[in-house]
């Protein structure tokens, strides 16, 4: 693991969800959940493949009825990643899912409360070597604990997990990971901190019912990233009201951005656009994201609104494109390499990214006519400066206004 500003990882035991190691220093894994009916085998498998392509390591499917368990029996052998069955109120569905061959279970202690049922599931899981996540959820906390703590508190959530572990312990089962999710970020963060002090079982992080993006993404990131930067967490899931592929992508991108996983896909950066922009930066960036899709090209690619500042601002990107006078200027590590018509910018980016991925930065620069590209960029830069002036963002006017305001307020203070 790259450390950077990240605290040392909280030490946890290691379990295996099928082929994926969780905890004990294993790479932090990304999870998501299908939203198809699990009985719809083909539809569910299509979604599992889409999630895998987006960077998901483990997929959870609901197992709420017999048809779902039967679907799992067909899905598990064809899935490219381990499958976890999400169990609701019926412990029998947990037994059925194990029968179907799932590589993991998720139980909510708030939903299955009879000790004999919990122990029956744990004993079966022990015999089969199937790990179980104890998935405490603030919204469905055991009413007794709710009463004891006068509401949903970090202590109540952790106690719920501890009680469940005690049942597991009675039957000698310890292939456990734990989550204490809540929709409130501060509550969830406190609960996980307390949990990390309480146990060395691996922890699954998430902010539950975070809602649709962008608010859901922000809530999920606030909670998950805070804990990861403290070294807490072994596997993560964003819970978004959105296509689950977005959850997987978000999880992957968060880990990559924190330096906790190697980059697998394009890291697209784009300038925020300003008075100089010669293109609709949001539109071009969006189209570029779509064009790259889930291709495994681990490069940083920049979409910049103007050739006046773009290549310089994004000089550390492996590849970028900046808009000139109706043309796109491609640059590699800040060096101008080619000029393309504006409507071919996205295609050109993809083509150059593929070339760099295959042959490297040096070869890309070597194949380019950098002298001509730089001359053309200089020409467009000059044309833009001539048409927009040196101060396209009207900063000078704002500076004058700022000075006037500051002067006026200090004069009134005297
Ligand atoms: S100066 Fe150019 S590259 Fe920088 S934000 Fe404005 S449009 Fe984008």
Image (cartoon, rainbow, N blue to C red):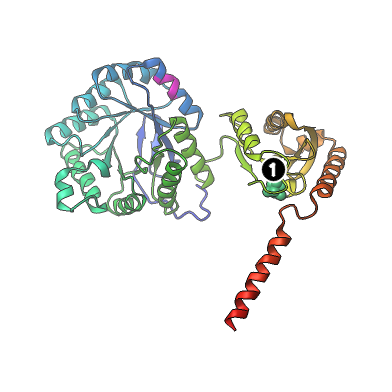
The residue at the far bottom in this view is 414
Dot 1 alpha-carbon crowd within 10 angstroms: few under 14, some 14 to 19, many 20 or more: many
Name above or below for residue 224 compared with residue 101. below
Q: Secondary structure at mark 1?
A: strand
Q: What percent of the width, then of the height, locates residue 272?
A: 63, 47
Q: Position of 346 compared to 81: left or right?
A: right
Residue at 53 percent of width and 45 percent of height: 257
Q: Quadrant of the C terminus?
A: bottom right
Q: Is residue 377 within the magenta segment? A: no
Name the residue rendered at 53%, 42% in the picture: 256
**Please, what is the dominant secondary structure of the magenta stretch?**
helix
Q: Quadrant of residue 18?
A: top left
For the residue pair 314 and 242, the one nearer the viewer reads as 242
Camera-nearest residue between 137 and 366: 137
Residue 216 picture location, percent across and down: 42, 42
Q: Is residue 287 placed above or below 179 in the rendered structure?
A: above
Q: Is residue 406 above or below residue 287?
A: below
Would residue 205 appear left or right of 271 to someone viewing this image? left
Q: Is residue 142 visible?
A: yes
Badge 1 is on which residue?
304
- Looking at the picture, how far across and down is residue 52, in whole percent? 47, 28
In the image, residue 59 sits, relative to residue 312, either above or below, namely above
Quick check: is 47 in the magenta stretch?
yes
Q: Residue 113 location, x and y as percent?
A: 15, 37
Query: How many numbered marks, from 0 up?
Result: 1
Whether ligand 1 has any atom under 8 Å from the Cβ at mark 1 is answered as yes
Left or right: 215, with 15 as reference point: right
In magenta, the rendered stretch is 44-48
- Asked whether residue 314 is in view, the answer is no
């Amino acid at each position: 693991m790259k450390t950077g500003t990240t605290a040392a990882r909280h030490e946890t035991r290691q379990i295996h969800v099928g082929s994926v190691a969780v905890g004990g220093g294993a790479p932090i894994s990304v999870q998501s959940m299908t939203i198809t009916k699990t009985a719809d085998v083909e539809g569910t498998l299509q979604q599992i493949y889409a999630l895998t392509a987006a960077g998901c390591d483990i997929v959870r499917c609901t197992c709420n009825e017999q048809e779902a368990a039967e679907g799992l029996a067909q899905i598990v052998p064809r899935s490219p990643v381990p499958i976890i069955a999400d169990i609701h109120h019926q412990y029998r569905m947990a037994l059925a899912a194990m029968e179907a061959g799932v590589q993991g279970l998720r139980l909510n202690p708030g939903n299955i409360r009879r000790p004999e049922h919990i122990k029956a599931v744990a004993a079966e899981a022990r015999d089969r070597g199937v790990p179980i996540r104890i998935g405490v959820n603030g919204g469905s906390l055991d009413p007794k604990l709710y009463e004891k703590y006068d509401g949903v508190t970090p202590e109540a959530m952790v106690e719920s997990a501890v009680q469940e572990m005690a049942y597991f312990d009675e039957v000698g089962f310890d292939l456990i990971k734990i989550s204490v999710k809540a929709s409130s970020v501060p509550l969830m963060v406190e609960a996980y901190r307390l949990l990390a002090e309480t146990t060395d079982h691996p922890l699954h992080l998430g902010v539950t019912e975070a809602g649709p993006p962008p608010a859901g993404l922000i809530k999920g990131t606030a909670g998950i990233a805070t804990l990861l930067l403290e070294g807490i967490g072994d596997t993560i899931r964003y819970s978004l009201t959105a296509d689950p592929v977005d959850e997987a992508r978000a999880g992957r991108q968060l880990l990559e951005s924190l330096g906790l996983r190697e980059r697998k896909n394009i890291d697209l950066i784009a300038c925020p656009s300003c008075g100089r922009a010669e293109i609709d930066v949001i539109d071009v960036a969006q189209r570029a994201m779509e064009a790259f899709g889930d291709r495994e090209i681990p490069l940083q690619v920049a979409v910049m609104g103007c050739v006046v500042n773009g290549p310089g601002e994004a000089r550390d990107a492996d590849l970028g494109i900046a808009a000139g006078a109706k043309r796109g200027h491609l640059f590699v590590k800040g060096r101008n390499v080619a000029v393309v018509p504006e409507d071919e910018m996205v295609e050109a980016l993809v083509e150059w990214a593929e070339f760099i991925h295959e042959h490297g930065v040096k070869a890309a620069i070597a194949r380019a006519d950098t002298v001509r590209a730089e001359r053309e960029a200089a020409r467009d830069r000059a044309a833009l400066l001539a048409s927009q002036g040196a101060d396209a963002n009207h900063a000078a006017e704002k500076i004058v206004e700022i000075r006037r305001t500051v002067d006026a307020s200090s004069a009134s203070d005297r």
